[in-house]
Image (cartoon, rainbow, N blue to C red):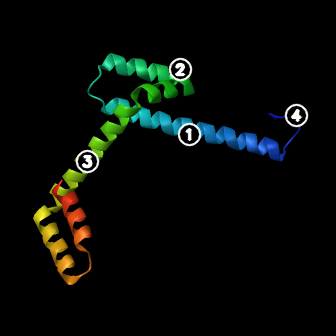
Amino acid sequence: MFFDGGFSFSNFLVDLLTVFAFVVWFWLLITIFGDLLRRHDISGWVKVLWFLLLIFTSFLGIFIYMITQARGMAEREAERQQAMRNELRRAIGFSAADEIEKLDRLRKSGSITEAEFSGLRAKLVQ
């Protein structure tokens, strides 16, 4: 038994908090490992050092990585999502001209306003 007082509500809350902290640590560790493995701007040796730091220092290593690399992680993830979106568009035959034509029909039928049409058209042209 971990607690001398037996099973109580406060012991349950501590156990719940411990499990939650472990799940958050594991999720962040997987996220950071994925980011490290996809990075092309650092060498393999630097990746190994980050892996060792993350494994042996637990939360401290995660906090250090998040503080020092958070902006780069966000940028790399946004680039990866945009590349996946573009690949999906290419695979299914997405055409901006077809989508603009559909938007024009919606505008002419009165389903969308001129402002909505302009905003949606600008997103498609990007």
Whichever of labels 4 and 2 marks the residue nearer the N terminus, that label is 4
Residue 4 disc label: 4
Query: Which one is in front in this view, the residue at disc 2 or the one at disc 3?
Result: 3
Distance (Cα) linking label 1 and label 2: 17 Å
Of pointers 1 and 4, the one earlier in the residue sequence: 4
Residue at 32%, 37% (x, y): give it. 75
Outermost residue on the right side: it is 5
Three-letter amino acid code at disc 3?
Gln
Residue on which disc 1 sits: 24
The relative height of residue 27 versus residue 52 in the rendered view (above or below) is below
Residue shown at the point (36%, 22%) measured from the top left: 47
* Measured Cα–Cα span from mark 1 to mark 3: 27 Å
Q: Secondary structure at mark 1?
A: helix
How far across and down, in percent of the image, does residue 60 sit? 55, 24
Say which element carries label 2: helix
Q: Is residue 120 left or right of residue 95?
A: right
**Residue drawn at (60%, 37%), measured in percent from left and top?**
22
Q: Residues within 10 Å of mark 3 (few under 14, many from 20)?
A: few
Front position in the image: 70 or 113: 113
The Cα atoms of the two marked residues, 2 and 3, are separated by 34 Å
Q: Residue furthest left?
A: 97
